[in-house]
Image (tube, rainbow, N blue to C red):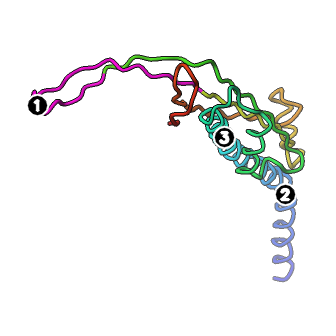
Protein backbone atom coordinates (compact mmCIF):
# COMPACT_ATOMS: atom_id res chain seq x y z
CA UNK A 1 0.00 0.00 0.00
CA UNK A 2 2.84 2.39 0.77
CA UNK A 3 4.41 1.86 -2.64
CA UNK A 4 1.17 2.59 -4.41
CA UNK A 5 0.76 6.00 -2.65
CA UNK A 6 4.34 6.90 -3.47
CA UNK A 7 3.71 6.20 -7.17
CA UNK A 8 0.62 8.43 -7.19
CA UNK A 9 2.48 11.25 -5.45
CA UNK A 10 5.36 10.94 -7.89
CA UNK A 11 2.98 11.13 -10.86
CA UNK A 12 1.47 14.32 -9.43
CA UNK A 13 4.89 15.91 -9.13
CA UNK A 14 5.83 14.96 -12.68
CA UNK A 15 2.53 16.35 -14.03
CA UNK A 16 3.00 19.58 -12.07
CA UNK A 17 6.58 20.00 -13.31
CA UNK A 18 5.47 19.43 -16.90
CA UNK A 19 2.61 21.93 -16.61
CA UNK A 20 4.64 24.58 -14.73
CA UNK A 21 6.18 26.28 -17.83
CA UNK A 22 2.74 26.63 -19.41
CA UNK A 23 1.25 28.01 -16.20
CA UNK A 24 4.14 30.48 -15.78
CA UNK A 25 3.76 31.61 -19.40
CA UNK A 26 0.06 32.24 -18.84
CA UNK A 27 0.81 34.15 -15.64
CA UNK A 28 3.36 36.33 -17.47
CA UNK A 29 0.87 36.98 -20.27
CA UNK A 30 -1.80 38.03 -17.76
CA UNK A 31 0.66 40.42 -16.09
CA UNK A 32 1.57 42.07 -19.41
CA UNK A 33 -2.06 42.27 -20.55
CA UNK A 34 -2.91 43.89 -17.22
CA UNK A 35 -0.14 46.45 -17.66
CA UNK A 36 -1.33 47.22 -21.19
CA UNK A 37 -4.91 47.71 -19.98
CA UNK A 38 -3.76 49.95 -17.13
CA UNK A 39 -1.58 52.08 -19.41
CA UNK A 40 -4.44 52.35 -21.90
CA UNK A 41 -6.75 53.72 -19.20
CA UNK A 42 -4.03 56.10 -17.99
CA UNK A 43 -3.48 57.30 -21.58
CA UNK A 44 -7.21 58.10 -21.86
CA UNK A 45 -7.14 60.06 -18.59
CA UNK A 46 -3.98 61.89 -19.70
CA UNK A 47 -5.44 62.82 -23.10
CA UNK A 48 -8.56 64.24 -21.45
CA UNK A 49 -6.47 66.25 -18.96
CA UNK A 50 -4.20 67.61 -21.69
CA UNK A 51 -7.20 68.55 -23.84
CA UNK A 52 -8.90 70.27 -20.90
CA UNK A 53 -5.71 72.24 -20.16
CA UNK A 54 -5.29 73.29 -23.81
CA UNK A 55 -8.96 74.30 -24.08
CA UNK A 56 -8.75 76.40 -20.92
CA UNK A 57 -5.66 78.18 -22.22
CA UNK A 58 -7.39 78.97 -25.51
CA UNK A 59 -10.51 80.13 -23.67
CA UNK A 60 -8.26 82.50 -21.68
CA UNK A 61 -6.94 84.04 -24.88
CA UNK A 62 -3.82 82.03 -25.82
CA UNK A 63 -3.40 81.74 -29.57
CA UNK A 64 -1.80 78.30 -29.46
CA UNK A 65 -1.75 75.73 -26.66
CA UNK A 66 1.58 74.93 -25.00
CA UNK A 67 2.60 71.27 -25.38
CA UNK A 68 4.79 71.30 -22.28
CA UNK A 69 1.96 72.60 -20.08
CA UNK A 70 -0.49 70.13 -21.58
CA UNK A 71 1.92 67.22 -21.03
CA UNK A 72 2.50 68.36 -17.46
CA UNK A 73 -1.26 68.46 -16.86
CA UNK A 74 -1.60 65.01 -18.43
CA UNK A 75 1.09 63.45 -16.26
CA UNK A 76 -0.37 65.15 -13.20
CA UNK A 77 -3.67 63.38 -13.77
CA UNK A 78 -2.15 60.07 -14.90
CA UNK A 79 0.94 59.44 -12.74
CA UNK A 80 1.22 55.86 -14.01
CA UNK A 81 2.60 57.22 -17.27
CA UNK A 82 5.63 58.70 -15.52
CA UNK A 83 6.96 55.29 -14.45
CA UNK A 84 10.16 53.56 -15.42
CA UNK A 85 10.13 52.15 -18.93
CA UNK A 86 7.25 54.38 -20.05
CA UNK A 87 7.63 57.35 -22.39
CA UNK A 88 4.92 59.74 -23.53
CA UNK A 89 4.49 62.23 -26.31
CA UNK A 90 1.64 64.56 -27.12
CA UNK A 91 0.31 66.20 -30.27
CA UNK A 92 -2.13 69.10 -30.11
CA UNK A 93 -4.06 70.30 -33.14
CA UNK A 94 -5.91 73.58 -32.82
CA UNK A 95 -7.06 75.04 -36.15
CA UNK A 96 -7.97 78.74 -36.48
CA UNK A 97 -11.31 80.18 -35.43
CA UNK A 98 -14.26 78.80 -37.36
CA UNK A 99 -17.80 80.13 -37.48
CA UNK A 100 -21.07 78.34 -37.70
CA UNK A 101 -24.63 79.56 -38.28
CA UNK A 102 -27.36 77.93 -36.27
CA UNK A 103 -31.08 78.42 -36.47
CA UNK A 104 -32.44 79.22 -33.04
CA UNK A 105 -36.09 79.32 -32.05
CA UNK A 106 -37.26 81.61 -29.27
CA UNK A 107 -40.76 82.04 -27.92
CA UNK A 108 -42.29 85.49 -28.16
CA UNK A 109 -44.94 85.64 -25.41
CA UNK A 110 -46.55 88.80 -26.85
CA UNK A 111 -47.07 87.23 -30.25
CA UNK A 112 -47.75 83.80 -28.74
CA UNK A 113 -45.48 81.96 -31.18
CA UNK A 114 -41.94 80.80 -31.78
CA UNK A 115 -39.70 82.99 -33.90
CA UNK A 116 -36.67 81.75 -35.79
CA UNK A 117 -33.35 83.59 -35.74
CA UNK A 118 -30.03 82.84 -37.36
CA UNK A 119 -27.28 83.00 -34.78
CA UNK A 120 -23.61 82.87 -35.68
CA UNK A 121 -21.01 81.72 -33.21
CA UNK A 122 -17.26 81.30 -33.40
CA UNK A 123 -15.33 78.36 -32.01
CA UNK A 124 -12.00 76.56 -32.04
CA UNK A 125 -11.62 72.83 -31.97
CA UNK A 126 -8.88 71.35 -29.77
CA UNK A 127 -7.73 67.81 -30.62
CA UNK A 128 -5.13 66.00 -28.52
CA UNK A 129 -3.39 62.71 -29.24
CA UNK A 130 -1.44 61.11 -26.41
CA UNK A 131 1.08 58.44 -27.43
CA UNK A 132 2.55 56.03 -24.89
CA UNK A 133 5.45 53.65 -25.43
CA UNK A 134 6.26 51.10 -22.75
CA UNK A 135 8.39 48.04 -22.19
CA UNK A 136 6.76 44.76 -21.26
CA UNK A 137 7.27 43.43 -17.76
CA UNK A 138 8.08 39.88 -18.84
CA UNK A 139 9.97 38.17 -21.66
CA UNK A 140 6.72 36.51 -22.73
CA UNK A 141 5.21 39.94 -23.49
CA UNK A 142 8.33 40.90 -25.45
CA UNK A 143 8.09 37.67 -27.46
CA UNK A 144 4.40 38.20 -28.25
CA UNK A 145 4.98 41.82 -29.32
CA UNK A 146 8.00 40.75 -31.38
CA UNK A 147 5.82 38.19 -33.19
CA UNK A 148 3.31 40.98 -33.89
CA UNK A 149 6.03 43.18 -35.39
CA UNK A 150 6.30 45.57 -32.43
CA UNK A 151 9.76 44.66 -31.23
CA UNK A 152 10.30 48.12 -29.70
CA UNK A 153 7.61 47.57 -27.05
CA UNK A 154 4.00 48.33 -26.37
CA UNK A 155 2.58 51.30 -28.28
CA UNK A 156 -0.72 52.87 -27.20
CA UNK A 157 -2.51 56.07 -28.11
CA UNK A 158 -5.55 57.96 -26.90
CA UNK A 159 -7.35 60.99 -28.29
CA UNK A 160 -9.58 63.70 -26.87
CA UNK A 161 -11.42 66.68 -28.37
CA UNK A 162 -13.06 69.82 -27.05
CA UNK A 163 -14.78 72.78 -28.62
CA UNK A 164 -13.98 76.25 -27.30
CA UNK A 165 -16.44 79.05 -27.99
CA UNK A 166 -14.72 82.38 -28.78
CA UNK A 167 -15.60 85.74 -30.28
CA UNK A 168 -14.71 85.73 -33.96
CA UNK A 169 -13.00 89.13 -34.07
CA UNK A 170 -11.04 89.15 -30.84
CA UNK A 171 -10.65 85.55 -29.82
CA UNK A 172 -11.84 86.50 -26.33
CA UNK A 173 -13.15 83.79 -24.07
CA UNK A 174 -16.75 82.68 -23.99
CA UNK A 175 -16.24 79.27 -22.45
CA UNK A 176 -15.83 75.70 -23.59
CA UNK A 177 -17.93 72.56 -23.87
Q: Residue at x 57, y 23 (%)?
A: 170
Q: Position of residue 53 (x, y in %)?
A: 66, 40
Q: Provide the residue designation for mark 2.
A: 20
- The Cα atoms of the two marked residues, 2 and 3, are separated by 49 Å
Q: Earlier in the sequence, mark 2 or mark 3?
A: 2
Looking at the image, residue 104 sits to the left or right of residue 89; the answer is left
Q: Position of residue 115 (x, y in %)?
A: 20, 22
Q: Is residue 117 magenta?
A: yes
- The Cα atoms of the two marked residues, 1 and 3, are separated by 45 Å
Q: Residue at x 85, y 43 (%)?
A: 86
Q: Are marks 2 and 1 in contact (CB under 8 Å)?
A: no
- In the depicted view, which residue is nearer to us: 5 or 128? 128
- In the depicted view, which residue is nearer to us: 170 or 141? 170
Q: Which residues are magenta?
A: 104-125
Q: What element does badge 3 sit on?
A: helix
Question: Viewer-nearest of labels 2 and 3?
Answer: 3
Question: Viewer-nearest of labels 1 and 3?
Answer: 1
- In the depicted view, which residue is nearer to us: 23 or 4? 23
Q: Provide the residue designation for mark 3.
A: 53
Quarter of the figure that contains the N terminus: bottom right
Mark 3 surroundings within 10 Å by alpha-carbon count, few (fewer than 14), some (14 through 19), many (20 or more)? many
Amino acid sequence: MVGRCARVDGASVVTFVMALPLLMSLLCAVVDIGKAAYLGMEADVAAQAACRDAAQRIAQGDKAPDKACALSAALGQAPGLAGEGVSCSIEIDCPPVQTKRVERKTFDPQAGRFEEQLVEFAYRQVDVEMRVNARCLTPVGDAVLGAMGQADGLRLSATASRTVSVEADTGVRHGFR
